[in-house]
Amino acid sequence: MNEYNFKGIKAESIQLLCENRFNDSRSFYQEHKEELKEGITVPMRQIMLDLSELMLDIDDMMLTDPVRSVARIYRDTRGHRNKIKYRENLWMFFRRYKNEFPGAPFYFFEFYPNSFGYGLVFWLYRPAHFKEVHKLILKHPDRWLDAVKACEDAGFAYECSEEYKKELYPDAPEELKPYLRAKNMSFTYYSNDLSRIASPALIDELKLAFDIARPMYDFFIDAYENMMHEGLIKPEDYYR
């Protein structure tokens, strides 16, 4: 096994994170802030450090700043109905800088009190723009199916949270139709075995899965860049 910065996220650290959320108290958080930082925040940032070389090889425009890529334990509750200030789950995104590339596809890793997961996601602020993915699927069906197979080989399951009810492409091959109804999609893996994130072996697991799924990331990025080229996605429309 390679020598990594990441040494694991331990069960006791996750338990403390849950207690911090349960107490939802600034005084409790301040009392345990250093423990939470060393047990949760630092290891999450170390994952980014250890994966940065691979992620830049996958996409040389990938943001690999560990501070900006990892969610904070403290929540900004302004404008939210949920006023709980602290999280019991944390995540990180491997993606291009969102202010320049809003809605770009991304890899992710996250954990909850009883599970963890990772994968590849493509969600858009305007679901209608996802038809550019459909166009590319229809134009290059073999490439698409090879990318789907790569995700399956990586251990990822296909998911779509929102679909068109009407068949948009009735003459398309049947094997493509499930994907041609999608307004967003993801290829993900989840496990309830938290012992697997308690050691550096997690880095090897993530590296292998993310690298195997690279053909799908490349496909998504090509579709995304088509959207930008056609003016469907303009950063100034999202960040003014």
Image (cartoon, rainbow, N blue to C red):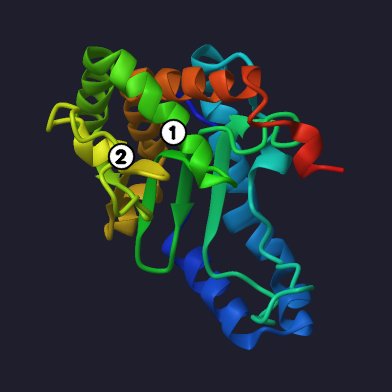
**Does 178 sit left or right of 123 as displayed?**
left
Furthest residue toward right: 240
Q: Position of residue 30 (x, y in %)?
A: 78, 74
Decide if residue 193 is in sight here.
yes
Q: Quadrant of residue 60?
A: top right
Q: Considering depth in this image, is 238 or 51 the residue closer to the camera?
A: 238
Calculate the distance from the C-alpha at mark 2 to the C-alpha at mark 1: 10 Å
Mark 1 Cα-neighbour bin, 10 Å: few <14, some 14–19, many ≥20: some
Q: Position of residue 172 (x, y in %)?
A: 19, 28
Residue type of the residue flagged with mark 2:
Leu
Q: Considering depth in this image, is 113 or 9 the residue closer to the camera?
A: 113
Mark 2 Cα-neighbour bin, 10 Å: few <14, some 14–19, many ≥20: few
Decide if residue 7 is in sight here.
no
Could you tell me which residue is drawn at 76 percent across and 68 percent down? 76
**Sequence-first disc among 2 and 1:** 1
Numbered disc in front, either 2 or 1: 2
Residue type of the residue flagged with mark 1:
Lys
Q: SS class of the residue under badge 2?
A: loop
Q: SS class of the residue under badge 1?
A: helix
Could you tell me which residue is drawn at 52 percent across and 22 percent down? 55
Could you tell me which residue is drawn at 72 percent across and 41 percent down? 68
Q: Quadrant of residue 19?
A: bottom right
Q: Position of residue 233 (x, y in %)?
A: 66, 31
Q: Which residue is mark 1?
A: 131
**Does 44 sit left or right of 143 as displayed?**
right
Disc 2 vs disc 1: Cβ atoms closer than 8 Å? yes
Q: Which residue is mark 2?
A: 168
Q: Position of residue 105 (x, y in %)?
A: 51, 33
User: Quarter of the image containing the C terminus?
Assistant: top right
Which label belongs to residue 232? none
